[in-house]
Image (cartoon, rainbow, N blue to C red):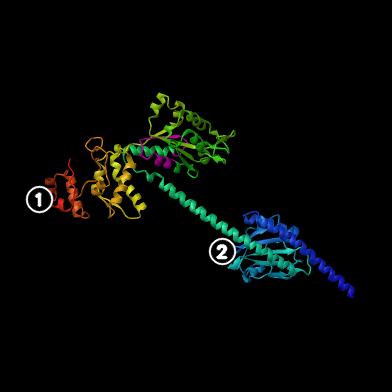
């Protein structure tokens, strides 16, 4: 009798050791699987397959809490038809699975068929075999799911199997925590990306190009039309007219808006560096090329490449650029592998390319390749009626930079509209920024404009330096209740062409009274 008992005990110990050996092998495989991928569902399915093959556990199932409903949803199931059970759910406290979640405790069923609360919604489990379910915990958050499986045989080792399932459930909990963190970070990145895209599109859309003149309306129409297609665009115009703004508007209102917008000033680099910047280089191609580098064309693949000052490139480099524009292919410097790219090219220049073509300084075939859709930006002197709107837009921009409120008076705008702006919008912005610095109160009036050095270095007596005021200039309103006394006197002087006697009549004053106010209010009288 004692011999039979010893044989039974030895057999049970052998079974326990055999189970431990298989569990250790399964645990090693599980740890390897959890380190392979961040795809949670794919990882869990592989994990359950390992437990089936090496851990002697059938029909492993992982159910995770749905954050919106609070129900348990089947997230992974080791079964050939597991995709059909993705809609199976359990409410907290419902059935065995729901009770495990609610109580946050393991549950061992020695025989499935003896438990009436076992719902078996998956219709998979053998009623004559045991069933083990354990909660999946994530730190101090409590149970976030349930891990359950059915042993392949009924034996006296259910407690050992339950502890093994708890170990696996702890590892699953860490994977769930990592997956949730990664998902939250990815969602935050997507939201930030979409926010930045909206901001960039707003900053570089049509709203950033100010103009109501007929010449600017033509530019807007051209930009709206050409933005729809992949046509090469050549933007012409003097320096400071806003050619880069137009290039931005074309890209961010085109189907390529989600692609990269890469810029390069061709006048800033010599030919050898320009070739490396545009086409990239291989490691060791030249002294200092310590690694392979992608060029601007590769960086802009699927997007837009803006080539500013295209008229400055040498005839030798023009031939290399022509090939990329014609064929869409090139080789890196020092390389022999031909690369193909899908890039839309927008070029800009302030040079007379037609004259360069006639003199042989610019290739005629490259000129026609670039000049598919020309857009000409008008000089600011040709659209002085846009100066008030431009000035107010720039003042708002400068105010954001300086972190304070800024305002500009009508008298200051009238001064700005008498100037021809040889430096175009860039010169206007510089003038307003200097005036903002000189204004302690944040109100930019005509005196602040003059204190900023407005027109210094120019012959303001010549007709090229001063232009007549446009018809749409802000008219002085001496009856405006928002004007203080100084602004009202200046408005009257402006309307009277700075003739003091006429201004006095407009204000119902005597010439002596207005002269006194000009002196006490420190108004600088302009002579014409």
Q: CA distance from mark 2 to mark 1?
A: 83 Å
Q: Is residue 188 left or right of residue 210?
A: right
The number of numbered badges drawn on the structure is: 2
Magenta segment range? Answer: 227-250
Q: Is residue 230 magenta?
A: yes
- Secondary element at image label 1: helix
Position above or below: 2 against 465: below
Q: Which residue is mark 1?
A: 512
Q: Is residue 54 left or right of residue 263?
A: right
Q: Nearer the viewer, residue 106 or 370?
A: 370
Q: Nearer the viewer, residue 26 or 465?
A: 465
Residue that extends furthest to the bottom in the rendered view of this protein: 1
Q: Which residue is mark 2?
A: 69
Neighbour tally class for label 1: few under 14, some 14-19, many 20 plus, Cα within 10 Å:
few
User: Residue 445, image x and y in percent?
Assistant: 25, 50
Mark on residue 204? none
Q: Nearer the viewer, residue 363 or 87?
A: 363
């Amino acid at each position: 009798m004692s011999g039979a008992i010893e044989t039974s005990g030895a057999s049970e110990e052998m079974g326990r050791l055999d189970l431990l050996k298989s569990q250790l092998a399964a645990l090693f495989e599980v740890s390897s699987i959890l380190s392979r991928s961040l795809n949670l569902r794919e990882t869990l399915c592989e994990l359950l397959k390992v437990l089936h093959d090496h851990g002697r556990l059938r029909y492993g199932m992982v159910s995770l809490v749905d954050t919106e409903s609070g129900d348990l949803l089947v997230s992974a199931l080791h079964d050939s038809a597991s995709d059909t059970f993705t809609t199976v759910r359990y409410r907290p406290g419902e059935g065995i699975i729901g009770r495990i979640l609610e109580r946050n405790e393991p549950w061992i069923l020695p025989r499935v068929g003896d438990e009436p609360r076992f719902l078996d919604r998956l219709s998979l489990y053998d009623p004559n075999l045991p069933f083990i379910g354990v909660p999946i915990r994530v730190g101090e958050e409590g149970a976030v799911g349930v891990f359950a499986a059915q042993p392949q045989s009924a034996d006296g080792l259910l407690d050992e199997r339950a502890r093994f399932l708890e170990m696996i459930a702890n590892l699953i909990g860490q994977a769930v925590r990592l997956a949730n963190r990664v998902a939250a970070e990815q969602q935050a990145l997507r939201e930030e990306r979409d926010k930045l895209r909206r901001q960039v599109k707003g900053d570089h859309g049509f709203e950033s190009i100010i103009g109501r003149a007929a010449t600017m309306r033509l530019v807007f129409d051209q930009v709206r039309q050409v933005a729809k297609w992949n046509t090469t665009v050549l933007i012409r115009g003097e320096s400071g007219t806003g050619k880069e703004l137009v290039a931005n508007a074309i890209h961010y209102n085109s189907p390529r808006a989600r692609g990269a917008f890469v810029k390069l000033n061709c006048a800033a680099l010599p030919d050898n560096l320009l070739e490396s910047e545009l086409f990239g280089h291989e490691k060791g191609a030249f002294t200092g090329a310590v690694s392979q580098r992608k060029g601007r064309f590769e960086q802009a693949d699927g997007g837009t490449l803006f080539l500013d000052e295209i008229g400055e490139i040498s005839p030798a480099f023009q031939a290399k650029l022509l090939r990329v524009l014609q064929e869409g292919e090139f080789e890196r410097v020092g390389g022999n592998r031909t690369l193909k790219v899908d890039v839309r090219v927008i070029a800009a220049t302030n040079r007379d390319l037609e004259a360069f073509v006639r003199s042989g300084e610019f290739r005629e075939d490259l000129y026609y390749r670039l000049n598919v859709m020309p857009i000409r930006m008008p000089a600011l002197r040709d659209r002085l009626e846009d100066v008030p709107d431009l000035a107010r837009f720039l003042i708002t921009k400068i105010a954001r930079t300086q972190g304070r409120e800024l305002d500009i008076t009508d008298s200051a705008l009238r001064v700005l509209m008498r100037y021809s702006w040889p430096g175009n919008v860039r010169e206007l912005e510089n003038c307003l920024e200097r005036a903002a610095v000189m204004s302690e109160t944040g109100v930019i009036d005509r005196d602040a404009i003059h204190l900023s050095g407005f027109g210094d270095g120019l012959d303001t007596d010549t007709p090229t330096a001063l232009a007549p005021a446009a018809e749409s200039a802000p008219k002085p309103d001496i009856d405006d209740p928002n004007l203080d006394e100084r602004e009202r006197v200046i408005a009257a002087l402006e309307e009277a062409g700075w003739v003091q006697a006429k201004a006095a009549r407009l204000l119902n004053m005597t010439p002596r009274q207005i002269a006194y106010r000009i002196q006490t209010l420190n108004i600088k009288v302009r002579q014409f």
